[in-house]
Image (cartoon, rainbow, N blue to C red):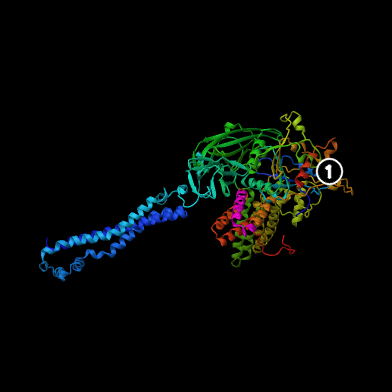
Amino acid sequence: MSAEFVFATAQYESGDWDSAPLVPPNIIDTIARYTEISVAPTGIIVPLSDDRMLRYPLLYMTGHLPVRFSEAERRNVKRFVERGGLLFVDDHNHDIDGTFHKTAVEEITRSVGALTDLPNDHPLYAAFFKFDGPPTTSHELNGWGDNLVHKHLLAIQRNGRIAVLYSSKDYSSEWNYHPDSKRFMSVDNTRFAVNLVVYALTA
Amino acid sequence: MNIFAQLRTVRMVLVAGVALRALVWGIVAAITLIVGAALVDLAVPVSLAARSVLVGVAVASGVAVMVALSWRDRSALSLPRVALWIEERFPALEYALVTAVELGDSEWIAAGSTQRWSTTAAGRGARALRAPIALAVIGIAVALLMPSGAVARMRAPHAGDSLERARIGKRGSRLTPLVAEVNPPAYSGEKTTVIDEPNDIRALAGSVVTLRGRGNGAGVVARVGADSVGVVTRGDRWSITLHLASRPAAVRLADSSYERIIAVEPIVDAPPSVTLAAPAHDSVLRVARGRIPLSADMTDDFGIAAASFEYIVSSGEGETFKFRSGTLGATQPNARRASIASSLLLDSLALKPGDIVHLRAVARDANNVTGPGVGVSDTRAIRIARADEYDSVAVDAAPPSDADKSVISERMLILLAEALQTKRPTLKRDALVGESHSIALDQKKLRRSVGEIVFTRLGGDPNGEEHSDDDSPQRAKTMQELLARADSATNRSSDPIDFAGGESPVVAVNKPLLEAYNAMWDASTELEIGEPGRALPHMRRALAAIQKARQAERLYLRGTPPRVVIDISKVRLKGKDKGTTNTRRALTSSDSAARARADRFTRIVELASHDAGAAVDSLLLLRVDALGEEPAFAAALSDAIAAMRGNKTDDATSALGRARRSLSGAPIARDSLARWGVIP
């Protein structure tokens, strides 16, 4: 098995799992930029219904449309979490109680358990960069989305570590740009992804 | 009364005596069995199963004794034997009575001497009854003298009657006897069950379990995990009441130095299982009109309270989506198995191109304690096609494609050529060349139609290769040359095609047809010179190529995401200085819980070698902890516990071995050593 970290995007049968295709390279670029973690230069897309998904410590899942897991997907998500994986689910709709939110939360609850607020002083926010909670996104503040700032991420914790991390903050929109465009930014908004990866690999 | 009538009277008295004696001995046998079992039960509890068959066994024993005694004394029915019996008691008869019976002549006996026979017979019968009646009286007296309820436990045994069992000797633990009464939640419709001396209680989550013992409850301590449970005393009984949650628990009971552990295993009410029968698969519709029939089948272990279809309509694309949802066909089956049906009117949803309708069936059970359990079917997506994707969703009937028609034609030409080759020896040269030329003309027409397909696809010019009816001297001599021409016709560029590095999709798709085209050309050349035998291999090659072309899968590619490859070295500014990041902790092994369980199991097995009782309790607690995550392990532990309680060493060893194997996982079977001789 390769020792390098491979960023994996979860493919599920329902919905538009590939709605943020530039997030993986952007996060890989960020990992390479700030850390010495050995990282694969491209991400991988892995079906949730395929046992290969169990090989990756971090799975990124997003979309706009309703999430309905098949039996195989539900079973694999449960196994993935039981084996210590971290499933990061981000609502690409950046809304509360939208359809992605309702259906994804329902499926996660059925597969793994109930989501609860993740405290803003959780070790995740200090795993690499220091944050006082989940970084806000422009989509929360520009009035285009739901015009709400979400104070917490949601999570399911197992044995003291995060097993499922759920975000309504739409990092998928926030990070969905070509890595070369980072040079136009005064502050890199993908730094939180470093915390996410470092936490998934070390916690 | 003559002597024969008197003799029959004596026989009747003797038979009655025999019957009565057999009956009373039978009753004595039955009473002895029941009273004896009751006496044993006072010292050692007799199991419910044994007591349940005891009455039947007692009756059978009584009947057996009665039949045996009656059979033994059946000679009382015989007149000669009755006569002999009388002769034995009245020797003065000097065999006159036996002679009279044998000869049938009553003159041998004086009439006056017969009266005493009946009296003697009655007395004999009465004497024979003394012993059994005395024993029966003793048995009944013993039964009456026994403690209250002792005989009733034998006569009418039922679950939970261990509390009514009388005891001999000093008072022991109040934890024995113990009875558990399990009241399932009302929605399940299940009956109350009673368990004597429970060690494991399996009951539906939400059930109320009452543990009852004898005596005053003061001093009896009950705990579930770290929580204490109140002990209630009512009369001469103490009890505790537990409400079964959805997690297994161990109930610890303590009475001074006595302790007892009872595993309580909740059976979780499974949510309904739902299968969406129609629509059977995802679909793409060209227009959003009409009615889609919906049907679903569902089952539940206790009953389905509500069922319906749910739909979500998602509209929009990119970053802008809107959703609508609703339910259809809501029913309340109130049955364990149900089928529901409805229909979705597409017109009423006002769907637009690009909209997606997500459909599923949902069922809820009647679980009002830990539920309701919700079961959902797979989701089907019905998408309304956009105008720009009609080519991939056309469902209109269409005639066979040109490629299909070409297959048929080429096959016919091959048949003709084969027939001509078969009859070639019988034909003159001119006739052979004439017929072969005729086939060559058809082959040429077919080649031209294939060429039209290919070159229309490639460049829009159906005459891209053939400009006249005559054979073109510029015909490509090789596949590479032909494909180069095709590609240049498509791309209008003079760049050479890189066959090694990959082809454009257009060339790749048309390659088999181009090959067929070339083979047909070779075939027609051979046919024109009257050589159908040499033409046939080319024709068959053409046929195979056409079939390959028509069997090729058509791929409709959606936009693929841009493939961005990060140049890690570049991002890291190619620096050689490897700075250190923050300290990382070692990754916690994900199977730490399983390892901890294995360690605990090992310690318990070691404990079993010198303290089996403690090991059983520890195994019970381990079983309770493992029930949720390792059911196979828990089942093996259950067997081990049962075997250890029954002092069955071999069974316990086998069950513990199974438990160990289930912890370690399935053995890995390999056909051979790994390639490098390393077993991973």
Residue at 40 percent of width and 56 percent of height: B36
Q: Is residue B491 visible?
A: yes
Rendered location of residue A114, percent (x, y): 65, 39
Q: Residue at x 69, y 57 (%)?
A: B519
Nearer the observer, B259 or B468: B259
Residue A151 left/right relative to B257: right
Q: Quarter holding the C terminus of chain B? A: bottom right
Span shown in magenta: B605-627
Q: Is residue B571 above or below residue A98?
A: below
Q: Is residue A192 above or below residue B171?
A: above
Quarter assignment of residue B530: bottom right
Which residue matches tag 1?
A: A34
Q: Residue furthest left?
A: B107
Helix, strand or loop at label 1? It is: helix
Quadrant assignment, res B413: bottom right
Label 1 Cα neighbours within 10 Å, binned few <14 / some 14-19 / many ≥20: some
Q: Quadrant of the N terminus of chain B?
A: bottom left
Residue B79, above or below B634: below
